Image (tube, grey):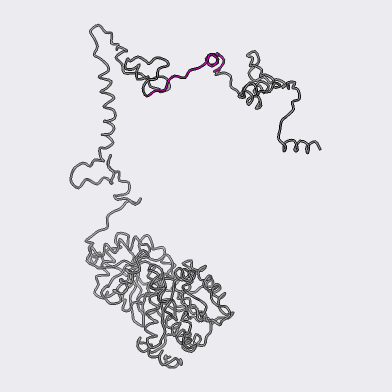
Amino acid sequence: MKFDSLGLSPDILKGIQDAGFEHCTPIQEQSLPECLAGKDVIAQSQTGSGKTAVFLLSIFSRLLAAGPNASNKPRALVMVPTRELASQVVDDAVKLGAHIPFRSVAIYGGVEYDKQVGALKTGVDLVVATPGRMIDLYKSKTLSLDDMEIFVIDEADRMFDMGFAPDIMYIAGKLPKNKPRQTMLFSATIDCNVRRLASRYMSPEPVMIEIEPEQVTVNSIDQKIIYVSNEEKYPVLLTLLRRPEVERALIFTNMKSTAESLGKRLTANNVPAKVLTGDVSQEKRSKIIDGMKSGNLKIVVATDVAARGLHIEDVSHVFNYDLPDDAANYVHRIGRTARAGKSGKAYSLACEDHVLNLPEIEKYIERKIENEWIEDSELAKDAAPEPERRRDGRGGKFGERRPFGSRDGGRPPRDGKRRPHDDRKARTHTEKKEPLIEAEKRAIPEKADGDRGGVDKSARPPRRQRGGRPVRKEAAEGRERPKEGSKPEGQRPERQRTEAQRSERQRPDRHRSDISRTDRPRTERPRPGERRERHKPEEHRKETVAPVTAWSEEKPKHQSVERKEPATEPVKEKGGILKRIFKKLLKK
């Protein structure tokens, strides 16, 4: 089927011809008539089969029929999972809508708000956004959803797998409900959970379109598997990259650290390569993608963040340096080649760490991947071998012990000299002990002829009292202690005590260690009221409080004694008004 038979506008057909498209792909042939009719569609197709053109042509056709945008508010919203896919969709919209007065903008994180906010204020018709930045602009009332007529979710399974389900539900709940709206979902893989979740925001019976579900991967991709050990993995990859048929290649790894180290090793072996991970800034990421499209850059090492949405023409080879843990990611990885009807090759290295992922991948694509062998004589030599690392993340071999006193893994100093920190402990230990030893030698005189081996006590260094308290400095140096009552310089005078206080301090039973307060019977303990009375002046003490019975040593230590209440005379209490009222209430 040709695009001319779909009844599209002449301006849209001009953009299609400028992009180089003439015939519809299978997904375009089956889904475009339904989408142009304004129906809700859920379409599943292979990666690179032309799903983006389906919803872009549907958006352009509907907006042209609705007339010019008088409010300058966006009328179509496309949600995508990654920044690369958002940029790619906007680029395709510019190509297909070159002869249409429609404006589009890509909204994603990692860049400043000013450019995106300025484009929204000027007025746009199509917004292609990632969920995070989209919600930020909506909450700040910079982006309005009041005039939305078309809502598209691209790579729907990826959106829900990445945890964007709450964001999608939030955005879909803010769309206008009183106006008619068309909803479309497109993805390479859609399971029953995605369909059930997406059906909440679509018509009761959306159109389901599946293109060759039994054949997930493209037939034009030549897939090979190479079984290697961990040591042979990099030499095999280097050998494949140096083949003359490799024009542009994408290398995928499972981890960011693996991609970074692999990019450095390839550059050291005169194989220029750039690394594309989630930590790369948007500006640098755009430069890498533009360099790949222009042909200035031939090799890119990336994680799964770049597996979707990258439409780079003439990618001849895709290398899976690590077999993906998810079988669906394998389909998206190799889908970066053989695009727009061209052929390509996909090599996968099955090493010891990831070979167990192969059966699940072959079950998912429903075919057996052919294996290929490379002779040892063909292996390229690594000019910059990867340094051997410990399993615990530090340098050196596992189990290797570092030399004593080394703090940098046993590496010798570059200048051949000993670093200050190597002998810091020994030097500090010696400096601390040496003054004490020399002081003791100076304090102890040499033995006389008549000595019996003893040492004069007066010549010894001052001892320390019991409990670790040092002897007074005056006594140690032989000086006289200042007289009582005088105030030496820098010291407080001795406290003057009365005769009663001195006698109290000299009582023999005052500090008895064999009797504690808790061991006394209850009758011998002072009551709380009596404790308070002791500290009152004598003129304010109550006459009715009985004196405390002294402790008798004839009684056993833990003997229970009957408690006898002392006879007290009624005393007229002098309380406040509230206390008297409270007592009257209790009596009643």
For the residue pair 14 and 229, the one nearer the viewer reads as 14
The answer to whether any part of residue 213 appears in the image is no
Residue 540 image point, x, y percent = 65, 24
Which range of residues does the magenta coloring cover? 490-510
Residue 37 image point, x, y percent = 52, 88
The quarter of the image holding the N terminus is bottom left
Residue 104 image point, x, y percent = 41, 80
* Magenta span main SS: loop
Is 346 displayed left or right of 5 in the figure?
left
Residue 461 image point, x, y percent = 31, 18
Tell me which corner region of the image, top left, top right, bottom left or bottom right, holds residue 118: bottom left
Is 345 rendered above or below residue 488? below
The residue lying at 38 percent from left, 77 percent from top is 88
Is 151 rendered above or below residue 557? below
Specify whether residue 574 is painted magenta. no
The answer to whether any part of residue 588 appears in the image is yes
Among all residues in the image, which is located at the extreme top?
Answer: 450
The quarter of the image holding the C terminus is top right
Is 523 displayed left or right of 214 in the figure?
right
Specify whether residue 505 is painted magenta. yes
For the residue pair 272 and 291, the one nearer the viewer reads as 291
Tell me which corner region of the image, top left, top right, bottom left or bottom right, holds residue 227: bottom left
For the residue pair 205 and 146, the one nearer the viewer reads as 146
Is 449 displayed left or right of 322 in the figure?
left
Q: How many marks?
A: 0
The residue lying at 37 percent from left, 62 percent from top is 255
